[in-house]
Image (tube, helix red, strand yellow):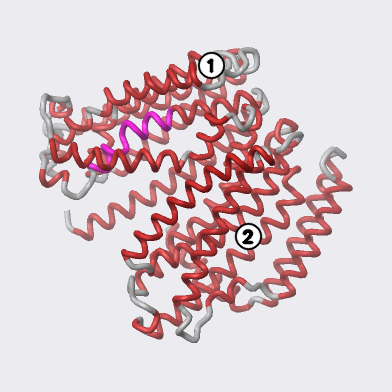
Amino acid sequence: MSSQDILESVSTLASYNVLLQVMFRVLTFLLNAFTLRFVSKELIGVVNVRLTLLYSTLVFLSREAFRRACLSGQSGKNHSWRTVINLLWMTVPLGVLWAVLLSCVWLWLLEVPDAHTVPYYSPAVVLFALSGVQELLAEPLWVLAQAHMFVRLKVVAESLAMIAKCSITVVLVVFSREWGLYIFSAAHLVYTGILVLCYAVYFIHFLGSKEAARNSFPLRRVKDLLPRRQFISKLSRLTWSFFKQSFLKQILTEGERYVMTFLNVLSFGDQGVYDIVNNLGSMVARFIFLPIEESFYIFFAKVLERGRDVKSQKQEEVAIVAEVLECLLKLVLVIGLIITVFGYAYSHLALDIYGGSLLSSGSGPSLLQCYSCYVLLLAVNGVTECFVFAVMSQEEVDKYNFIMLALSVSFLFLSYVLTGWAGSVGFILANCLNMGLRILHSLLYIHRYFQLSRWKPLRGLLPSPPILLALGVSGVVTAVSEAFFCCDSGFLLRLIHIGVGAICLLGVLVAVLLTETKLVQFVSTQLLPRFRKKRT
């Protein structure tokens, strides 16, 4: 396969991965909205935080190091695929070991939920661990599919599994809600079972076929997929190195859930509300800001040469980059400010529509209000880091990795301290402080990078006074509207509150159109055509 073919396949795979993530987010969003009408927030908290953490920890520690080692550039060259697959089968006994150890921790060392509020906790722990081990049965097939760019297989398998999981959850929640955690355990077992079944059926059909022979597939028979007695010392050592890295990565990635689970800083009900609000708020960042970051990281990386200062770059290209960076910063800042201002007055209403009184009566509205502020920081950090990562030298990237490690550890500490002071809001405050420090680092780097040039792209962080005025007025008006018209005063008054917000938003957009002509031109000529091309 040529480099161009590999690039096209990887690009297709990346596009499908993004599509899958969007689909999973939407399905999870709709599933949560539905199940909240039928089950308690304590049950949601145990499933979405405690049991999901058990499953993710088990599969990550069992397979991540093997995936990275076996998908590295040298594995398929220095070792035959039969020996690589033989190593991959080690994930199953390792998964059984982790399942036993983690199940013991989850059953006997952690706080057990009240049996009346959250029934069948112990069987659910066992079943979630079993589902993780079951998924590992497909690991050799998954790695084969990834290495040979079987893009559609992953899309079909994960789509079918997710649809089956959602369908079973909905049916059991409606007709057998007294089953409690058995509902979500059964749905998760079906999810992993269908994943394994799809991969097994595909490769049983594919191996020995004309298509496999035409593509010079390295395995010929189904028997070649089975484990054998063989040891690969070099690849095993590489796997062990990746395992040490992945262990730390898992702790930092799931830091919030580990703090919730092991330090008992929140009740199960508060954990459920926090997880739902966190997923709800992150959808905005993923759907709006992530595509911008991914597209323009490629732009910055292609136009500028990594590791060279601004004077060593082509000056006409530096001018283009500076203008694009300024417009991007202003765009995400304006969007983030709009979300922050209107999020404050409409968080209560949004949660009431989404989850009813279960979400809108407790800490949910204040959580979403704080998360609206956090979205602003996410927006700015995404663009600043995307530029910084595109122009940093390898040495600077290595140094920044240590900074990120220190920030991640400090985030875990801050989460523990601030949740003791402010409850679940403390997690968002810790995220805000962590994100603020990352933004500060990126801003200082950008300032130093352009210091010797005549371009100042950080001016993009200064919106025009009319926009600030429009946002300020909108914030006051919508807050007053919420106090008078929302959210327990009937359907008609809710519509009035929504109408007030729509008028205020229109005013802000008019201010943007009239005062930020450069930004409007950038969006219409550069951003929109770029995303139209991506869709087509």
> Residue under circle 1?
121
The stretch in magenta equals 55-69
Whether residue 530 is situated above or below residue 234 in the rendered picture: below
How crowded is the residue under tag 1: few (<14 C-alpha within 10 Å), some, or many (20+)?
Answer: many
How crowded is the residue under tag 2: few (<14 C-alpha within 10 Å), some, or many (20+)?
Answer: many
Say whether residue 59 is magenta: yes
For image coordinates 85% across by 43% down, the residue present is 492
Q: Is residue 153 visible?
A: yes
What's the mark number on residue 45? none
State which tag comes first along the sequence, 2 or 1: 1
Q: In the image, residue 188 lies at what x, y percent?
A: 45, 24
Q: Is residue 201 visible?
A: no
Whether residue 253 is situated above or below residue 141 in the rendered picture: below
Secondary structure, mark 2, is helix
For image coordinates 27% across by 22% down, the residue present is 93
Residue type at the position of mark 1: Tyr
Residue type at the position of mark 2: Gly
Viewer-nearest residue: 32 or 160: 32
Secondary structure, mark 1, is helix
Say whether residue 171 is magenta: no
Q: In the image, residue 524 lies at what x, y percent?
A: 55, 71
> Residue under circle 2?
336
Which image quarter: residue 513? bottom right
Q: Quadrant of the C terminus?
A: bottom left
